[in-house]
Amino acid sequence: MREKQVLPVVVVGLTAALVAVIALWTLDRIASPESATASQEGPVEVIEWKLVTTWPKGLPGLGAAPENFARRVNEASGGRLRIKVFGAGEIVPAFEVFDAVSRGVAEAGHGAAYYWKGKIPASVFFTAVPFGMTAQEANGWLHYGGGLELWRELYAPFGVVPFAGGSTGVQMAGWFNIRLNNRADLEGLKMRIPGLAGEVFDAAGGSAVRIAGGEVYTSMQTGVIDAVEWVGPYNDRTLGLMEVGDYYYYPGWHEPGAMLETIVNAEALASLPEDLQAIVRVAARATNTDMLDDFTANNSESLQILLSEFDTEVLPLPDDVMDALYESSQVAIEALVNADPMAKKIAASYFAFAEKVRTYHEISERAYLNGRDRLLPPVSLTAESAE
Ligand code: CA
């Protein structure tokens, strides 16, 4: 009687186990993308892109952005869109990146819009405007204030689609081998300073020189230039500028939030399946945000190292120098706007947004920083403070 009862239990148990195994196997088949793709769509198409940059290969910060963009696209697409990054000079020199993407020599690029101001004068609005918007403000203008649409319109004739490609935040005014006391000290000073700021510097009595990142150290060391602005503590330390510059001035009046760019050949982008186009857009947006985070963390870290290990002398630009640069910047911006209809159109949008956000930031960002600093101990820019 006992054995008769045990047998049906075993049969029921074995049947249930078999059903479960078949069910799990079926679920696994349905869930497996490999089997679904192989049986229904054939082999996966892999698209390969080249991305050229204006940065020396392996440069942290600026150079990390295109590497991160490529990695994000590769990962999010499951390897269907593979982007290989080339540093300045590997396929084209730094200042030929835009042309290379425009002609389709490379499908994508990373650099700074103001490098193309000889060809596209209004491009400077999409990197930095002297005494203009900070990174937070410029990002608001680009993504919610009509800025990106104007940028796309500006690049459309060249078959290039731009995306915001990261920001350094407020830069440093740069490394100077003379001490600045007043505006007369700018007279005849040779400085590596690109973009509209170069024209401003010329108008203020100096002499702007255009040099790519890979050459600034030697140019300072050999006395080809007397001063150099590159970025800020993080990337300046990478280039070793504390070894060739005597005084480190702030703030970066000329690049209050230098925006970089990720650019894509318009035809190459349009020829992608829609999901890969979406991945390119999302990866570009993520890279844009990520760079500012990287610079915020590493500029703070590198400043401490410059102060404590290199005894870097960090100084504010004298008011008279700031005044002279501001006056010259107004002249340069007016000349640019009067000479170029697109610059005029973009300037109208840029400065209208800038004025609105300045008003709001008066009672938000500035009010908060002032309020906080009234209560905290004052910061010090000497070696002792960094120890
Ligand atoms: Ca710079």
Image (cartoon, grey):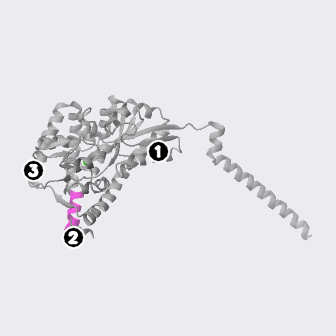
Return the residue nearer the eye: 84 or 296. Answer: 84
User: Could you tell me which quadrant the C terminus lies in?
Assistant: bottom left
Asked whether the beta carbons under mark 1 and mark 3 sit within 8 Å of each other, the answer is no
Q: Is residue 372 magenta?
A: yes
Q: CA distance from mark 1 to mark 3?
A: 48 Å
Q: Is residue 329 visible?
A: no
Q: Is residue 40 left or right of residue 253?
A: right
Q: Main secondary structure of the magenta part?
A: helix
Asked whether the beta carbons under mark 2 and mark 1 sit within 8 Å of each other, the answer is no
Mark 3 sits on what residue? 185
- Identify the residue at image location x=24%, y=44%: 128
Disc 3 crowd rating (10 Å Cα; few below 14, some 14-19, many 20+) is some
Residue 235, percent from left and from top: 31, 53
Q: Amino acid at mark 3?
A: Asp
Of mark 1 and mark 3, the one earlier in the sequence is 1
- Identify the residue at image location x=41%, y=40%: 51
Disc 1 is placed on an element classified as helix
Mark 2 sits on what residue? 375
Mark 1 sits on what residue? 73
Of mark 2 and mark 1, the one earlier in the sequence is 1
Of mark 2 and mark 3, the one earlier in the sequence is 3
Asked whether the beta carbons under mark 2 and mark 3 sit within 8 Å of each other, the answer is no
Camera-side mark, 1 or 3: 3
Camera-side mark, 2 or 1: 1
